[in-house]
Image (cartoon, rainbow, N blue to C red):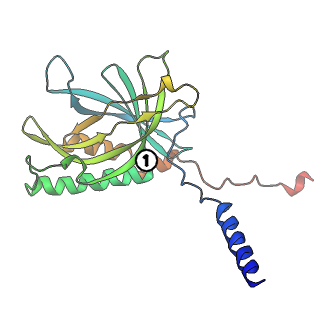
Amino acid sequence: MRILSILLLVLTLGSCQLFQRKPPEPLRFTVRTNLDHVELGEVEMQIDKRFPRSGLIKVVIKVSYYPEDDAVCLTYRSDFFTYQHFWDYEGRKLFVKSLETYRTDFASRNLHSNQRNTKSIYGVTEGFLTWQEFSFSLRHQANMNIEYGYFFRERYPYFSINQKQALYEDKIDRKNNTASQEVTMYFTIAQAQELVDLIDDAVLEIHSIPRIQRTPEINPDFY
């Protein structure tokens, strides 16, 4: 009888573990790109030339803000693709902090061209990316890692934002699965500071949506 009781206890504990719910995965940063957004301005940056020869090319970034998702968007074109590169609050804060560190390292000549992994030396965060080749083609979207650091190009130590590869997975047809290119954005201190000024908290606060909506006041005389 004692053995039977032990067996029942073991089976009961086993079944509890079998049906125990897995903890939900944390929500990933996404942006509803069909929502209204606010144009904040434009800044310039440099990216690598793919062809016909190596070097840098200057590109204009359109900066916008999606208040309902509290997301900043950097829109630019590279190699026939239009990219929408999104930062959440944590991504913006890391960008600002990284630029401050880079500025200090730049002033103290603490930047080294022979050091490995300088593109991620100031930190890594998760962002959200969309990419589209033509206006009538499918717009792909996925999360990607964003690296903040610096990199020497043409003997100049540019502040860099490295947009890692993003993988789009089609839930219906795997043939549509595709990956974005890895893109490194190069900024001078002045260019990066212009971007900081556009996405300053005080600027975004003007366009932000209150988390708690006020209820309309009731006029007692109406009743």
Res. 7 image quadrant: bottom right
Residue at the right extreme, as displayed: 223
- Which quadrant of the figure contains the N terminus? bottom right
User: Residue type at mark 1?
Assistant: Val
Along the line of sight, the residue nearer the viewer: 196 or 174: 174
Along the line of sight, the residue nearer the viewer: 36 or 121: 121
Element type where label 1 sits in the image: helix
Residue 92, x across and y down, in percent: 38, 50
> Residue sitting at 36 percent across and 43 percent down?
198
Q: Is residue 42 visible?
A: yes
Q: Callout 1: few (<14), some (14-19), or many (20+) C-alpha neighbours within 10 Å?
A: few
Q: In this view, does 141 lie above or below 14?
A: above
Residue 150, x across and y down, in percent: 19, 46
> Residue sitting at 74 percent across and 74 percent down?
8
Residue at the bottom extreme, as displayed: 2
Res. 154 image quadrant: top left
Along the line of sight, the residue nearer the viewer: 104 or 25: 25
Q: Is residue 200 visible?
A: no
> Residue sitting at 37 percent across and 54 percent down?
93
Res. 127 image quadrant: top left
> Circle 1 sits on which residue?
203
Residue 43, x across and y down, in percent: 30, 34
Q: Relative to 42, is 207 on the left or the right?
A: right
